[in-house]
Every structure is written in C-alpha cells, then in structure tokens.
Amino acid sequence: MDISIQKKYTVKEIRNLTDSTYVVRMNRYGMGFKAGQNLNVGLTGDTEKRDYSIYSGIHDDYLEILVKEVEDGLVSRKLKRLKPGDQMEVDGPFGFFSLKEKNISTKKFIFIASGTGIAPFHSIILSHPGVNFKLIHGIRHTHEAYEKAHYPSGRYVSCVSQDKDGDFHGRVTDYIRQNPVDKDTLCYLCGNVNMIYDVFDILKDQEVPSENLHAEVYF
C-alpha cells in the first residue's frame, strides 16, 4: 500500500472530554506531519469535510484530532457517533502553523488559544518536549481546560471567563494586559478571530514586533 495516497483511516477510539468536546484517535498509517498542521476530515463517502488541527504528537503511532460538537455542525455531530473500527476519509497534512526548527531550542514562546484552538499547541508541546513555552488558554468554564494534566506544571494558564476557580478569572486579553509579553518572545495564536485581533493589538502596544506574531484562525 502506498501510504502517500491512503485516505481511509480507521477509528481506534473516541475520547470524550466534555459533553460536547471529544478526541478522535485513528490509525496513522505512517503519515508524516509537522506539529501544528491540520487534516481535512469527514465520513467515508460524505461530501462534507472540515479542517481540524492534529492533536497528537509527531512521535505517536496514531493520529488524533480535537473536535467540538456544534449544534448545526455538519461534520462534528457525525464524527461523534463513530465507533472503533469505523472509517473516516482524511486528507493532508496541510498548513504552515509550525515552529521553525532553528527556534525550538533557542527561543521563548507564548502560545495563546481559545477553546479547541489549543489543539495545535498540544501537538507542538508533545512533539518538542524541550520547548520553552507558556500556554494561555481562554475558556468559559473550568471543565473546558482540556487534558490540562498533559502540560508541565506552571506552563499552562487557564483564563476562565465564567467561573472563578481557574488559574485566572477573566479573558485572555485581560491576562495579556496584566502580564506583558517580552519583546523577544515568539507569539503563536489559535482560535476565535476576534480574540486574535484583540491580542494582536495588545501585543503591538507592548512593542512585540510584528514578525514575532503568528496566527491560525480556528473559527
């Protein structure tokens, strides 16, 4: 079998993180990818497909994606009903939201995510365990701190807007204003487009150079 043209992937596990958010694990079939890239995913034979960032690391022998089921979602609702042994159609990997090799061991990073926009950072951190980072995760409720135990102690900060028992009560923008970013930090943002625009403005006011800002709009 030529793995370069393999498009049908077998589901190994569906892991529910909340009532609406889950991880799909599937066979990897030798697919190579860079941490931060995404896959185009759908049910076998279905014309509707969506892009999801790869959640697993480059050294794992499986692929994972993090999915949030949305009420009118044409793909997310169908994926949640899959069972081990079912097949999916997968294209990719795609995208350029990855760390440059020369920076991984020499630079300081801040990863800023909202909701399931944390997925590419989960892959990056698993893939590059020596990377110097802080991960800022904007969520509404503390139960949406998806698998926070996967991150090294002190590296993950949940910014919780609705509950008061997270690491920080407030939005990501509030946290960044109160904790200015060093100018030499490489900043990667993934998530809601409004969050990205607002954080970009704050970082520019903090004199972080534009060449240090990288974004992936997730929804």
Image (cartoon, rainbow, N blue to C red):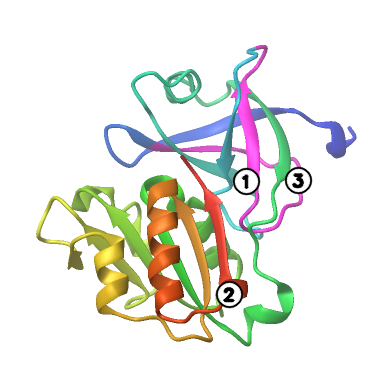
**Dot 2 amino acid type:** Asn
Asked if residue 41 is among those painted magenta in the image, a careful observer would answer yes
Question: Is disc 2 in contact with disc 1, using a CB cutoff of under 8 Å?
Answer: no
Q: Quick one: label 3 or label 1, which is nearer the N terminus?
A: 3
Residue picked out by circle 3: 31
Q: Tell me the quarter of the picture where residue 200 sits.
A: bottom left
Mark 2 Cα within 10 Å, few/some/many (few <14, many 20+)? some
Q: Secondary structure at mark 3?
A: loop
The numbered mark at residue 212 is 2
Proximity of marks 3 and 2: CB atoms separated by less than 8 Å:
no
The residue at which mark 1 appears reads as: 62
Residue at screen point 20% across, 68% down: 167
Drawn side of residue 60 relative to residue 101, left or right: left
Q: Position of residue 137 (x, y in %)?
A: 34, 60
Q: What's the distance in space between the residues labelled 3 and 2, CA to CA?
A: 30 Å
Q: Nearer the viewer, residue 106 or 9?
A: 106
Q: Which residue type carries mark 1? A: Tyr
Say if residue 170 shows up in the picture: yes
Looking at the rendering, the stretch of residues picked out in magenta corresponds to 22-45
How far is the residue under mark 3 from the one under mark 1? Answer: 9 Å
